[in-house]
């Protein structure tokens, strides 16, 4: 088992590294401000305050500015193809003073600090090197988190399907080879650590259901939640399901009814509230108020109040994932987010969500997805007596919470900034469920399951190969 | 399922991957010689007979096609005449034929004949011979380097038109790969070069094939 786990981790990390070295610098979403945050922290040891958190605002230090202008950065265009310009950019970054600027963290200053503090390790290790080299090391380091996500997905699938060890690597490899996961984790972006922490939370919850509740398992879940909360505010979406898992776990303890209820209530409250209190404390420490630390996507603009139009908001959240109902205002004129944003984005939309693989690729992907879902449905039907409904319910609560948090954040962002918000990666907190679905599908395929496993992993591998080549063609072809 | 059967599946999957890769790499296409890198966040209104001229364009030798983005306002867009000139001399010209493009941003390409030598400071002009159309570009605060726009109301006073330049002839990705490798190493880590491209591609292929075969072995247990 250990060898299989490490093999999957190796595939994930090397995949992340391939994305790290193929994607041009600053082309992973919001990478400029994430690097700015690490640059400021790495130079001063201080957490940057929310000096200029306007979405899209870039106020870099001289060194970072030299790199950005040298590339030169553009949302929709390739970097320079001129060798002299490249040398000049390296020289300009080398000559520019290291002096940081607090505002260079931009909107990333709204995020909790854990990812950036960890990224400061490779930053400091390569401190004497050119900024372009430091960015490479930061990217390679970030890819390690994809390995962690893959490892916890492996362990999560192991808890779900303990009798079918051959399915564990299949679920883990689905995550390891997912192109958007590799692309994002291969850049400097806190989502990489957030997904790893979420995968750990899924594993901890599965342990509670399979092996029962004890202090160690609750602490494990709490640790995963604390890491997630210290990384990005979107992780608040995990708390309801985590609390529910602990409550259900406590309810099964061989204790008198009243004590059971007390443990369930106390445990759930501890798991759900302690990270929340921690988040509020962090927000106070870094922002001086409870209303700012980063949400699901682009963080809030400091001080802007958003009016609540509940019916519109509900309509938006619904239409973000489901077909519009007749009485709803059309929130996405002329297109379906389910296909255009979530599915095509999952198959392959890169850069700042600008470059999408041709639609026929997504259609093939849809065919594969339909097959996998059909097999999962078959499994649910055939194994209905063996399914732990309470556990399934917790995962559904987890998924629903993430969808709602992303929806609400998206609505408020659109209201505030009048800009599109939705990106597939915001749902990648649920990557372990994706891995689990694939593992369940191959398990449900009966005697063809193992052959299907090889075919699916080959498809995932091919998906990654062509996604990387697509990315290379966009920027260099 | 027998181990041997799984290895056969892995072999077929590997062969399919390599064949797909081979087809992809051998398919001919027009690759870019340069791109001016301006984003497409504003439009230039171009009436019938209107002209947009984007100066200060470095155009490499061998360029034979100019690609840009339009938004259709009439049932049919174009024709659009495109020319590349420098020092008062036209080095290449061609036309985008009239066509129905549909809504949204659409890319169009004009074949202009082969530019014989590198032009470090060329001007690209687009003349609209059809109904009103919009051309995409990036707004800028300053007039320096901005395009000359038609004398009709415009959303932005100064605009840098988004232009891509492509080879005159089609090449396969395999033939073009050395150029990709040279570009790939630029403005990344200081020690990067073309060699890192080949290394990354080799790693990519090895991870893909290795994972397929490792999976066949792992699930056979």
Image (cartoon, grey):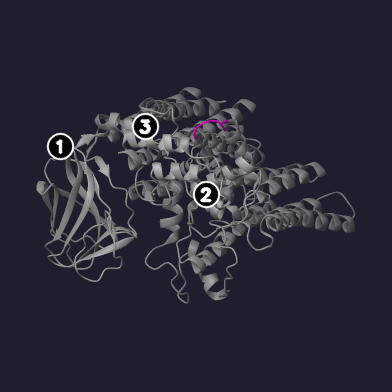
Q: What residue is shown with label 3?
A: B17
Chain ID at mark 2: A
Residue extending furthest bottom? A327
Chain ID at mark 1: B
User: 10 Å neighbourhood of mark 3: few (<14), some, or many (≥20)?
Assistant: many
Q: What residue is shown with label 1?
A: B117
Badge 1 and badge 3 both on one subunit = yes
**Highlighted range, magenta:** A126-130
- Between marks 3 and 2 in the image, the one whose residue lies nearer the viewer: 2
The reply to whether residue A22 is in sight is no
Q: Residue A241 at what x, y percent from top left? A: 68, 55
Residue in the image at 42% along x and 34% along y: A91
User: 10 Å neighbourhood of mark 1: few (<14), some, or many (≥20)?
Assistant: few
Badge 3 and badge 2 both on one subunit = no
Q: Does the magenta segment cover residue A127? A: yes
Q: Secondary structure at mark 2?
A: helix
Which quadrant is the N terminus of chain A positioned in?
Answer: top right
Residue in the image at 50% along x and 59% along y: A55
Chain ID at mark 3: B
- A361, above or below A243, in the image: above
Q: Secondary structure at mark 1?
A: loop
User: B174 or B163, which lies in front?
Assistant: B163
Q: Residue A82 at what x, y percent from top left? A: 31, 36
Q: Residue B191 at what x, y percent from top left? A: 43, 27
Q: What residue is shown with label 2?
A: A33
User: A53 or A358, which lies in front?
Assistant: A53
Q: CA distance from mark 1 to mark 2?
A: 41 Å
Q: CA distance from mark 3 to mark 2?
A: 38 Å
Residue in the image at 79% along x and 46% along y: A213
- Mark sitting earlier along the chain (1/3): 3
């Amino acid at each position: 088992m250990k060898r299989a786990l490490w093999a999957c981790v190796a595939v994930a990390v090397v995949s992340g590294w391939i994305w790290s070295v193929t994607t041009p610098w600053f082309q992973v979403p919001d990478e400029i401000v994430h690097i700015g945050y690490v640059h400021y922290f790495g130079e001063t040891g201080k957490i940057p305050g929310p000096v200029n958190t306007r979405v899209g605002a870039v106020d870099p230090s001289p060194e970072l500015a030299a790199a950005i202008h040298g590339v030169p950065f553009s949302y929709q265009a390739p970097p320079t193809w001129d060798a002299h310009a490249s040398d000049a950019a390296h020289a300009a970054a080398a000559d520019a003073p290291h002096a940081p600027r607090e505002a260079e963290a931009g909107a990333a200053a709204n995020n909790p600090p854990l990812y950036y503090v960890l990224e400061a390790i490779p930053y400091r290790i390569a401190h004497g090197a050119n900024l372009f080299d430091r960015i490479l090391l930061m990217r390679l380091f970030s890819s390690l988190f994809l390995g962690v996500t893959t490892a916890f997905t492996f362990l999560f699938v192991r808890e779900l399907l303990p009798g079918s060890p051959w399915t564990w690597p299949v679920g883990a490899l689905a995550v390891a080879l997912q192109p958007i996961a590799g692309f994002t984790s291969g850049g400097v972006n806190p989502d990489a650590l957030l997904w790893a922490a979420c995968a750990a939370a899924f594993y901890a919850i599965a342990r509670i259901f399979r092996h029962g509740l004890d202090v160690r398992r609750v602490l494990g879940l709490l640790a995963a939640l604390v890491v997630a909360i210290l990384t990005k505010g979107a992780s608040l979406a995990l708390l309801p399901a985590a609390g529910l898992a602990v409550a259900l776990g406590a309810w099964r303890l061989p204790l008198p009814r009243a004590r059971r209820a007390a443990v369930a209530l106390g445990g759930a409250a501890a798991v759900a509230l302690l990270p929340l209190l921690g988040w509020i404390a962090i927000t106070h420490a870094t922002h001086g108020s409870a209303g700012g630390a980063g949400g699901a996507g682009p963080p809030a603009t400091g001080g802007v109040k958003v009016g609540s139009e509940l019916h519109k908001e509900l309509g938006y959240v619904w239409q973000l994932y489901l077909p519009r109902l007749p009485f709803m205002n059309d929130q996405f004129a002329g297109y379906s987010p389910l296909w255009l944003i979530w599915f095509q984005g999952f198959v392959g939309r890169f850069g700042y969500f600008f470059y999408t693989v041709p639609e026929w690729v997504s259609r093939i992907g849809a065919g594969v997805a339909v097959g996998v879902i059909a097999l999962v449905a078959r499994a649910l039907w055939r194994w209905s007596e063996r399914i732990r409904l309470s556990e399934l319910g917790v995962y559904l609560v987890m998924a629903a919470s993430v969808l709602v948090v992303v929806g609400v954040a998206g609505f408020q962002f659109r209201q505030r900034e009048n800009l599109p918000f939705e990106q597939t990666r915001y749902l990648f907190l649920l990557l372990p469920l994706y891995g689990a679905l694939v593992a369940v599908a191959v398990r449900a395929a009966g005697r063809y399951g193992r052959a299907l496993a090889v075919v699916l992993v080959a498809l995932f591998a091919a998906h990654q190969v062509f996604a990387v080549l697509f990315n290379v063609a966009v920027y260099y072809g | 399922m027998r181990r041997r059967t799984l290895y056969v599946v892995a072999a077929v999957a590997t062969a399919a991957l390599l064949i797909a890769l081979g087809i992809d790499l051998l398919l001919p296409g027009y690759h870019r010689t340069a791109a001016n890198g301006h984003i497409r966040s504003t439009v230039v209104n171009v009436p019938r007979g209107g002209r947009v001229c984007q100066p200060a364009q470095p155009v490499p030798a061998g360029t034979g096609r100019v690609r840009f983005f339009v938004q259709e306002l009439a049932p049919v867009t174009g024709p659009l005449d495109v020319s590349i000139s420098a020092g008062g001399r036209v080095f290449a010209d061609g036309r985008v034929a009239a066509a129905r493009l549909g809504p949204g941003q659409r890319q169009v390409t004009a074949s202009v004949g082969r530019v014989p030598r590198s032009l470090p400071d060329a001007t690209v002009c687009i003349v609209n011979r059809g109904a009103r159309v919009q051309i995409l570009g990036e707004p800028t605060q300053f007039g320096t380097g901005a395009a000359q726009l038609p004398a009709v109301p415009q959303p932005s006073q100064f605009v840098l038109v988004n232009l891509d330049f492509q080879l005159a002839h089609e090449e396969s990705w395999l033939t073009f790969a050395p150029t990709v490798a040279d570009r790939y190493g630029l403005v990344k880590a200081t020690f990067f070069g073309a060699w890192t491209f080949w290394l990354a591609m080799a790693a990519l292929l090895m991870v893909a094939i290795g994972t397929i075969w490792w999976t066949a072995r792992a699930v056979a247990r």
